[in-house]
Amino acid sequence: MRTAPSLGAGSKTQAGDDNPLILKLSRFLPLTESDRQMLDGLIAGEAAYPADTDIVSEGMVPRFVFALKEGMAIRYRLLPDGGRQIMTFLIAGDLGDTHVSLLEAMDHSIGTITPVRVAPIPRDAILALFAGTPRLAAALRWSALQEEAMLRERIVSLGRRDARGRVAYLLCELLCRHQAVGLSDGAMVRLPLTQTELADALGLTPVHVNRVLKGFRERKLITLDRKKLHILDSEGLRAVAAFNHDYLRLGGASEDTRHAIAALERRQREDRPAL
């Protein structure tokens, strides 16, 4: 992938629930109006990247966290022989690493699949958010833990699932994630992935991926046409994958977590000096 120009500021997104980051983090905890305004401010800036472009490259010193506002990107590693392993797919509402301030250099690349719009967020702004807003800090940690869980599932797929199970699992996961941030039309999502990109994520060849997808179409589990995936038989596809979405933690924070965060917020208000 070619490397795009440096990040810059741009136009603001619409406020409130048009902010995909708000939509995602609200899956974990209800956000206050102050939280929403803060998140709107964080992604007010904008940079556009064309398809097949590195947003950050392996070895680069990261200076920003970024929020993906539109489009699809990937985390990937290039091997010495030119092979590529895709680790995860990023969609609107996802964040680049929130702990970049701890890194001397990136150990992987993040590149675009489609043209994307991203919001660059300075490291200092993320650190201040973690220090001063317990609710948003918890939601951002949940977002990072969700991606770690997806990586664990990918390891399970590569080690223990057959080709049909790997493809089915990834399609089910992508549908759930799109639905969670309002990017689906029922069981239909935009899926601008080539068979090579699916193969690079699943440890298969493009020919093998093509064969699996053809089988799914013949069984009327899916249609995949003009970069749109329509899951016709959700239960059938889930059965092929033995899919369980619990690892995505879309049901929200536990009661214990909610109480703990509320207690932190109360303590923070009490400690705040009177005007």
Image: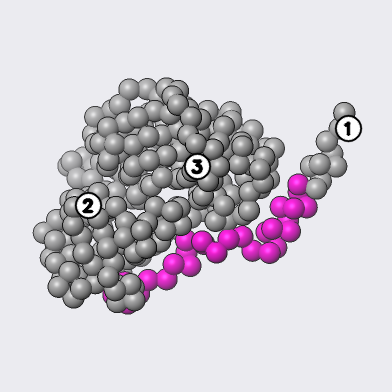
For this view, does 253 lie left or right of residue 203? right
For this view, does 35 lie left or right of residue 98? right
Neighbor class of circle 3 (other Cα within 10 Å; few <14, some 14-19, many 20+) is: many
Q: Would residue 214 be counted in the magenta stretch?
A: no
Check residue 19 in the rendering and tell me which mark sits there, or answer none. Answer: 3
- Of tags 3 and 1, which is closer to the observer? 3
Which residue carries the number 2 mark?
227
33 or 27: nearer the viewer: 33
Asked which quadrant contains residue 71, the reply is: top left
For this view, does 249 lie left or right of residue 270? left
Where residue 99 appears, as percent x and y from the top left, is 52, 39
Q: Residue at x 40, y 61 (%)?
A: 176
Q: CA distance from mark 3 to mark 1?
A: 33 Å
Question: What are the residue bounds of the magenta stretch?
Answer: 239-265
Q: Residue at x 57, y 32 (%)?
A: 41
Q: Residue at x 27, y 40 (%)?
A: 114
Q: CA distance from mark 3 to mark 2?
A: 24 Å
Residue 267 vertical placement versus 102 (above, below):
below
Check disc 2 and give the amino acid type. Answer: Lys
- Of tags 1 and 2, which is closer to the observer? 2
Q: CA distance from mark 1 to mark 2?
A: 56 Å
- Residue 46 seen in the figure: yes
Check disc 1 and give the amino acid type. Answer: Ala
Where residue 257 appears, as percent x and y from the top left, is 68, 59
Task: Check if mark 3's residue and mark 2's residue have beta carbons within 8 Å.
Answer: no
* Earlier-in-chain disc, 3 versus 1: 3
Which residue carries the number 1 mark?
274
